[in-house]
Amino acid sequence: MGFLLIMLVLLVFMMWSGNRSRKKMQNQQEEHRRRMDEGLVPGAWVKTSVGFWGRFADRDGDVVILETPGGTETYWDVAAVRDIGEPPFAADEPEAPVEEEPEKPVLGLEPGGPSFAQTPEPPSSSDVSDAPDPGTSFEPPSSAAEPDDDSDTKN
């Protein structure tokens, strides 16, 4: 009997906490929807769920028309609009010049010296003077330690 009472109390608590979190989520969705309705005025910058930034131009039911900076109009589902606000474009003001730090050697390589990305230069004709002429035949060097062919003699 005590076990059933504990289970009943746990079930009621789970239903109550689930209902509370559901109401909280509904309130958040309503607040977001209200903010979107108030903020969707012509000329307002909006961000879509895929990261597209455009200016709001018009709304027709569930379709919104967003305008690119170049003036092209694109049609989007109203559910794709995620945020209203200024886009993170670069400022028109010139930035202060940044002082460059002197380069430090990395792994013992000197700055401005050869790097691993550079391709080696092909050998010059003076480097290949030891190579045989293409028209001559190749003979392997004679070896002093040639194996003896004493297959006739067995110990």
Image (cartoon, rainbow, N blue to C red):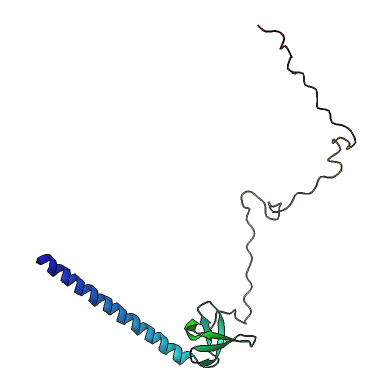
Residue 76, visible in the rendered structure: yes
Q: Nearer the viewer, residue 40 or 152?
A: 152
Q: Which quarter of the figure is the N terminus placed in?
A: bottom left
Q: Which quarter of the figure is the C terminus placed in?
A: top right
Look at the picture and state if 147 lies above or below 135. above
Q: Residue furthest right?
A: 135
Circle count: 0
User: What is the x, y in percent for residue 51?
Assistant: 54, 77
Q: Nearer the viewer, residue 130 or 60?
A: 60
**Residue for point 62% across, 85% down:** 69
Q: Residue furthest top?
A: 155
In the shown orientation, is residue 29 left or right of residue 102? left
In the shown orientation, is residue 5 left or right of residue 35? left
**Residue for point 56% across, 82% down:** 53
Residue 81, visible in the rendered structure: no
Tell me where residue 34 sits by quadrant: bottom left
Q: Residue furthest left?
A: 1
Q: Nearer the viewer, residue 86 or 143?
A: 143
In the shown orientation, is residue 83 left or right of residue 134? left
**Residue for point 62% across, 75% down:** 96
Look at the picture and state if 9 lies above or below 81. above
Q: Nearer the viewer, residue 93 or 57?
A: 57
**Residue for point 19% across, 74% down:** 12
User: What is the x, y in percent for residue 142?
Assistant: 80, 22
User: What is the x, y in percent for residue 9?
Assistant: 16, 72
